Image: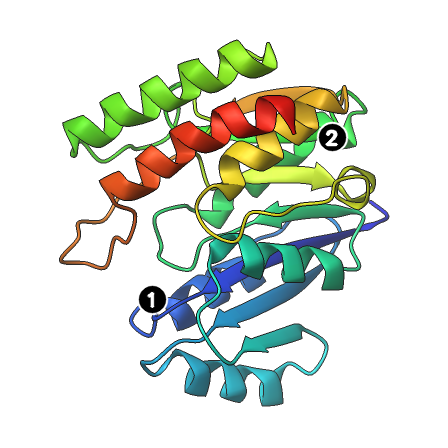
Amino acid sequence: MSGKLSVVIPVYNEEKTLSEIVRRVALVDVGMAKELVLVDDGSTDGSRGILRSLQKEHPEWIFIYHERNMGKGASLRDGFAAATGDIVIIQDADLEYDPADYPLLLKPILDGHADVVYGSRFLGGGPHRVAFFWHYVGNRILTTFSNMMTDLNLTDMEVCYKAFRKEVLKSIALRENRFGFEVEITARVAKGGWRVYEVPVSYYGRSYAEGKKITWRDGLWALWCIIKYRFV
């Protein structure tokens, strides 16, 4: 299969999981060339040291370093700009999502049906950690409200796993620096009339003790962003 996949991995204080997620991403067979784009967002633990070592081992990969924490949205924006692949997948560095699901995400695009593919933790399929009832409720509320504003029928707007044809990302001017990114990119994809598909993905959610970062404040900001990007 021709073409190249770029996997953009934002990193912020993920020293416990970073090496393992990079190993899994590097090993997964997607039937095409693959590059990793790793963006360190001002980590204060050992993440940057791990990335420096990886950079020496893999000069063919792309490494970006923020001198201060700018947010996940800013990291993804920089990663998208640097990516050279025909298709781009977002991969968190915390092991909540399994790169073994990449073929599922890629298939609708490679078959010519989709321009954008969202994973969904709620469609069934792979393993799904049972926890965080109120996170589930909040996600459902945000996804439903987003669908009302965009006229999409997604089941999991806030999911990490999203795959894009590079042309889609080139057509979108993203602004959000933090967790409002998910809302903004969904709104801009909908406004652009791009073909969106969903596929089931597995989910190994972690606790706050294990390093989960998103909070209720991020949920409130996402609600505001849903309204904002309906009109902007």
Nearer to us in this view, 108 or 143: 143
Residue 207 spot, x, y in % from top left: 17, 49
* Element assignment for label 2: helix
Characterize the local packing of mark 2: few (<14), some (14-19) or many (20 or more) Cα atoms within 10 angstroms: many
Q: At 74% from the left edge and 64% from the top edge, which residue is drawn?
A: 82
Q: Amino acid at mark 1?
A: Thr
* Element assignment for label 1: loop
Distance from label 2 to label 1 (Cα)? 29 Å
* Apparent side of residue 121 relative to residue 149 in the rendered image (left or right): left
Point out which mark residue 109 bears.
2
Residue 201 visible in the current orientation? no
Coloration mode: rainbow
Q: Earlier in the sequence, mark 2 or mark 1?
A: 1
The quadrant of the image that shows the N terminus is: top right
Q: Amino acid at mark 2?
A: Ile
Q: Which residue is mark 1?
A: 17
Residue 146 visible in the current orientation? yes
Residue 177 spot, x, y in % from top left: 52, 53
Q: Is residue 155 above or below residue 70?
A: above
Nearer to us in this view, 152 or 219: 219
Q: At 33% from the left edge and 19% from the top edge, which residue is drawn?
A: 140
Point out which mark residue 223 bears.
none
* Apparent side of residue 55 relative to residue 161 in the rendered image (left or right): right
Residue 51 spot, x, y in % from top left: 50, 80
Q: Quadrant of residue 59?
A: bottom right
Q: Is residue 202 above or below residue 43?
A: above
* Apparent side of residue 101 relative to residue 47 in the rendered image (left or right): right
Nearer to us in this view, 88 or 180: 180
Circles 2 and 1: CB distance less than 8 Å?
A: no
Characterize the local packing of mark 1: few (<14), some (14-19) or many (20 or more) Cα atoms within 10 angstroms: some
Residue 70 spot, x, y in % from top left: 48, 65
* Number of marks: 2
